[in-house]
Image (spheres, rainbow, N blue to C red):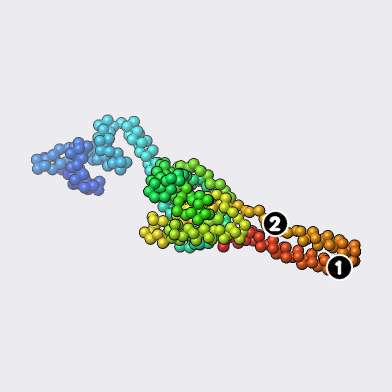
Amino acid sequence: MTDKKEYYTAGELAKLFGIPKQTMFYYDKLGLLTPEFVAENGYRYYAMPQYLTLEIILFLRKLDISVPHIKEFLEHRSRDEILNILKEREVLCRKTLAETTELLAAISSYRKTLECTQHLPLDRVLLQCYPESRMYMTPIPKVHRGGFDAIAIRARHVHEAFAHSFCKDQPTGWVISEEDFFSKNFKHSSAIVTQSGEEGSRLACNYIRPSGLYLSILTKGAYFLHAEEAYEKLSAFMEINRLAPDGDVFLFPIISYWATKNPDEYINSLSVKVKDLPPPEIEITRYAIIIKSLYRAVSIEGLYYGLILWSHIMTYGSLLHKKAEKHVLPWRRGLLIL
């Protein structure tokens, strides 16, 4: 019998590479790794050529090369063949790396959002300047608003919005028309919308929400149960500050069914673009009358009556100033919340 020091059994060779012995039998069965010889007792013995072949097989398997492809390579191996394999794997690895990076960013962003929800200013109206925002929007025809029709449209929307993205890393929400929301019709949405991220994102984009002044509020609980409360707060803020809605209401979930089974724990963000109303007309008629009377008094009755009328002017002017001050927007005095 040949000196055993020149050969390895299946178990010994498997141990050198840290793989199960059954793997050696499997490769033998597939014709990938045939032993140097098989002893009368059925033991398989492997020499240096099989050692080198097994090294190639395990390396290619780590590159996720299929067994048939490995077998073909072993039969026709060459410098060009291994270069082709490495180039293909490099492209695939770069794609996988990009997907992993995207997934990692999505995980990190969602984790930070959830962590911040413990300190969110709930039920407080904020007045802020929003930049332009890229979005993907799918209108819901009036005849399909509400019920399962809207759900089917949402499913199609999500598929289209994330068709070229590795993961769902942006929130999908609803648009409530300005007419519906401010007439207290909270049951139907006019569109489904997904934030598309910054320029260069792989997410679809067919709508740009304009920059400008926006009112926003975070509400806790299911939207349909708390929409009227949000409406009352937004309307009160606009009335006090002489603002008017200038577009539809956008609703995006912060805490949704992804994070809780209890709808009472949902947190939604509502925002609407607003515009200034014309400033209130301040009466100047009485000013004109007083000034005219002063002119007459100075020319007819003398300085005494003139001083009395001038006192009236100063007093009324102060009242007008206070009246006008009431209409200065609180946010222009440094206040952002109601």
- Image spot of residue 160 (x, y percent): 42, 42
Q: Earlier in the sequence, mark 1 or mark 2?
A: 2
To which residue does mark 1 refer? 305
Q: Does residue 93 sit above or below 322 in this rendering?
A: above
Instruction: Tell me if 110 is positioned left or right of 45 in this view.
Output: right
Task: For residue 261, say whether it is visible.
Answer: yes
Give yes or no for contact between labels 1 and 2 (Cβ–Cβ under 8 Å).
no
- Image spot of residue 1 (x, y percent): 11, 40
Q: Does residue 19 sit above or below 29 in this rendering?
A: below
- Image spot of residue 252 (x, y percent): 47, 53
Instruction: Tell me if 312 is positioned left or right of 220 in this view.
Output: right
Pick the front one: 214 or 240:
240
Dot 2 amino acid type:
Glu
**Residue at (45, 53) in percent of width and height:** 187
Secondary structure found at label 2: loop
**Residue at (30, 41) in percent of width and height:** 64
To which residue does mark 2 refer? 281
* Quadrant hosting residue 329: bottom right
**Residue at (41, 52) in percent of width and height:** 107
